[in-house]
Image (cartoon, rainbow, N blue to C red):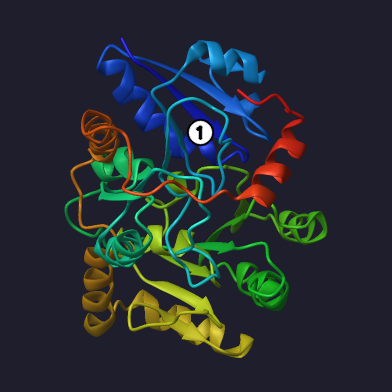
Amino acid sequence: MSNYLFYGSERYTQAIMRPISTAIKARGDQVAWFFNGPGMEDLHADDIIFTRVEQVLNWNPIAVITPNNMVPHFFPGIKVQTFHGFDAGKPRHIYIRGFFDLYCTTGPKDTSRFVTLANRLKHFHVVETGWPKLDYFFSQLPTQIPPVKSPPRILYHSTFSPSWSAAEILYPEVKRLSQTGEWKWIVTLHPKMNKETRSKFKDLENENLTFSETDNILELFTEADLMCSDTSSALSEFLLTGKPVITFKNRRPGPQLIDIQKPEDFEPAIRKALTRPSELMNAIARFGAEIHPARDGKSAERVLDAINDFIIKGGKNPKNKPLNLWRKFKLRLAMGYWKFN
C-alpha cells in the first residue's frame, strides 16, 4: 500500500484533487491532505488531514501532488504539479520555479512548451495526462452541444486582478441587461475578488440574476448557453463545452473568442454569440483539441500512472533541481518550519 499527499493553499485545491483521491483509493492506496492556506474547512469528514509537518514526515508519501506553483521541498516523495487552470495569457503559466520533479500537463499546447524547457533544463519530467478536475465534467458532458435555452442563460465570471478584471467596467451593463428579463444571468467571481466588487454584484440578485458562491465553476457550465469573462483561465474550461465565450480586452484573444474593447459592444456580442456562427463554433472545437484533447474522464488515472512510471524508472531527473534558496526560505517562513530533515 502506497501513501500519497495532496498539498494546497487555496480552496480550489479540492475540486482539482478529488478525482485523484478517488483513483488512489480505487487502487487500494491511501491519501492525506495538508493545507497551508484556506480550503481545509471544505474537506470531507472521512478525509485524512494533517496540520503539522511531522505528520507528513511520518506518513512518508511516495508523491506530493498539488495544483500550486510551489510545494514544500522538505516533504518526502516526488513533487508533482497538476496546475490550477489553463493558460489564459497571464504571466508565468509556463514558468519553472524549481520545485517539481514531474509536471502533468493538460494538452499538446502546454506539453510542447514544457517539454522544450525540460529538454534544456533537465531537472524535471513532463507527461501529458489531461486535467483531473475535468474527469467528472467530461463524464457528464453531452455528446452534442445542447440548443440555446429559452430564455438563454448567461454565465458571467471575472478574474480578481484589477489589471485583468472587467468586473467593474462591465458592472453597469450586467446590471442593465439583467433587469430587462430577456436573459437569465448567473454571476460568479474569482474567490480572491475584492469584497466591494463582490458585494455590488451580489446586490444585483433579482428574478433574472443569481449570484453563485460555488468554488467549483464547472457546476454552472451545463446551465449556461454562453460565458462572459475577461482574462480568466475558467473561460478555457467553458470552451471545452463547445459553447461561445465573450471576453473584454482578453490578454490572448483568438478566433475561439468574441473579444470586445468597449462596454457598449457587450450586448451586441451576446446577441451574436447566441446565434452560434459556424466560424466561431469551428474555432472553439479546434481550440479545445489543442488544450485538452482527452475526453475520457481518466486524467486522474494517467496522473497516477505517470507518477508510478517515474518512480519505477528511478524517481530522478538527469540534473538536480536548482538550490532555490530564496523561495525555500520564504516557504519555510510562511510555514514556520525550520528543521532540516
Judge by depth and name the residue closer to the eye, 208 or 269.
269
Instruction: Count every numbered label the image shows and give the total.
Output: 1
Residue 201 appears left or right of 20: right
Residue matched to label 1? 14
Judge by depth and name the residue closer to the eye, 134 or 291.
291
For residue 237, which quarter of the picture? Answer: bottom left
Point out residue 321 in the picture as x, y percentages from the top left corner: 46, 48
Task: Specify whether residue 152 is in view.
Answer: no
Is the N terminus in the top left, top right, bottom left or bottom right quadrant?
top left
Residue 210 appears left or right of 14: right
Is the C terminus in the top left, top right, bottom left or bottom right quadrant?
top right
Residue at far right of view: 196
Q: Residue at x 33, y 59 (%)?
A: 118
Task: Specify whether residue 166 is in view.
Answer: yes
Point out residue 53 in the picture as x, y percentages from the top left corner: 64, 20
Depicted 90 relative to depicted 303: above or below: below
Q: Residue at x 51, y 67 (%)?
A: 183
Give amino acid for label 1.
Gln
Point out residue 141 in the picture as x, y percentages from the top left corner: 26, 47
The secondary structure type at the circle numbered 1 is: helix
Judge by depth and name the residue closer to the eye, 208 or 117.
117
Residue 307 appears left or right of 248: left
Depicted 261 relative to depicted 311: above or below: below
Point out residue 34 in the picture as x, y percentages from the top left corner: 58, 25
Q: Residue at x 74, y 28 (%)?
A: 338
Decide: few, some or many residues near mark 1? Use Cα within 10 Å; few <14, some 14-19, many ≥20.
many
